Image (cartoon, helix red, strand yellow):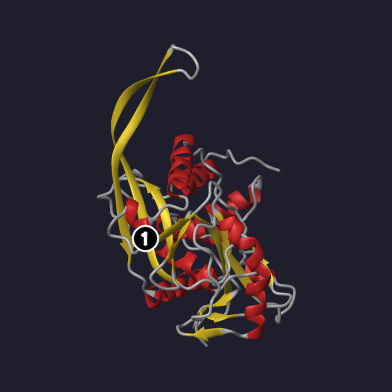
Amino acid sequence: MGLLRASSASARWPLGWSAPCALRPMRELVSRRCELGTLTVSAKLAWCALPGARVLRTGSRGERASSSAVRALASPPVASARASASSESEEVVFELSPSDFAFLWDGCRRCFYLKAHKLLPRPRTPFPSIFNEIDVQMKMYFRNASTTDIIPEMRPGYFVCEEKDLWVQSQPLRVPGRDAKIVLRGMVDSLVQFTDDESYGIIDFKTSNVDKSLAMYSRQLHAYAFCVENPGPASEVPLLNISDLALVVYEPKRFSAVRWNQEGTFKQQIGGRLDGELAYVPIERDDAAFLEFLAEVVAVLEEPVPPAPAPPNRWSKGGSGCAFCQYLIDAKRAGQTAEE
């Protein structure tokens, strides 16, 4: 079977509609189209109807690591979550976040494994609020804007985004050659509705260096595309045909002070402004390469024990290249693991 993609008769959002306005009335329509089979098969991945399937979630907010989990991380073996299925016929489904394909997978496959098996997700680290504010301001600026008015090299169309990201979640998918199935789930920054055909694009906004290697984000964008082209019931985005993947990268470079009169008074206010470069970075669609990557991921997750911690790097001073793993290893050696 192949990846199910939208036919030429797929539903479109009316131009100028914001995403939530368009999504709500279309959910029932999309589910009906799925039932009636008005889809065409064109690629390499299959929908999998899994009644009663067991989903291994990636960990919830506030979940606490026990001392046994710390010991498990520091010294294998660790019992696989697959072994805890209540019956042989029960299928295992891993819920995976596209954003983890960009950093966590390359940073430490052991941490990736433990999170996917819901054994020990990494603790949340503080994220500077200024990046969230920049992200919100970018979305509000691009909302319903013409693509070519802002980025001339883009195809003609309109940005579809809101202050709140769009939640996408795929149907359970089977990767060729593997037993376990996966559900991809995450938040999309923006869609683009192109006016020269019936296709859409997926855009991810980044505040970063324009000249920095951004290839790592290709996996993340491909995962979002698979979610939109194979939407599950919880997805806020209906079934759409995705033709383009791209990053819009903002790189702050210059700061300047500005003054203005406070509204209704003659009192001057002083503030600041960041100016910089805005770059459009298209990502070539390569489903075959992404499927190879997913097969590698699932092969690791199907192992009965997690991989070893990340190898040393130039910053690790001889220990694991994963600071989180090394911290737990050092804590165990020092006898500083907390008991429940």
Amino acid type at circle 1 is: Ala
State the SS at label 1. Answer: strand
Q: Identify residue for label 1.
A: 246
Asked if one can make out residue 102 in the rendered structure from this viewpoint, the answer is no
Q: Which of 68 and 134 is in front in this view?
A: 134
- Left or right: 139, with 152 as reference point: right
Please say if 172 is above or below 122.
below
In the rendered image, residue 249, in percent from the top left (x then y), is placed at 34, 49
- The residue at the far bottom in this view is 1
Q: Which of 19 and 335 is in front in this view?
A: 19
In the rendered image, residue 287, in percent from the top left (x then y), is placed at 40, 75
In the rendered image, residue 61, in percent from the top left (x then y), is placed at 64, 47
The answer to which image quadrant residue 218 occupies is bottom left
Q: Which residue is drawn at 34% across and 22% down?
A: 258
- Left or right: 267, with 181 as reference point: left
Please say if 269 is above or below 286.
above
Q: Which residue is drawn at 47% across and 36% down?
A: 128
Please state, as top left, top right, bottom left or bottom right, where the C terminus lies in the image. top right
Q: Which of 337 and 16 is in front in this view?
A: 16
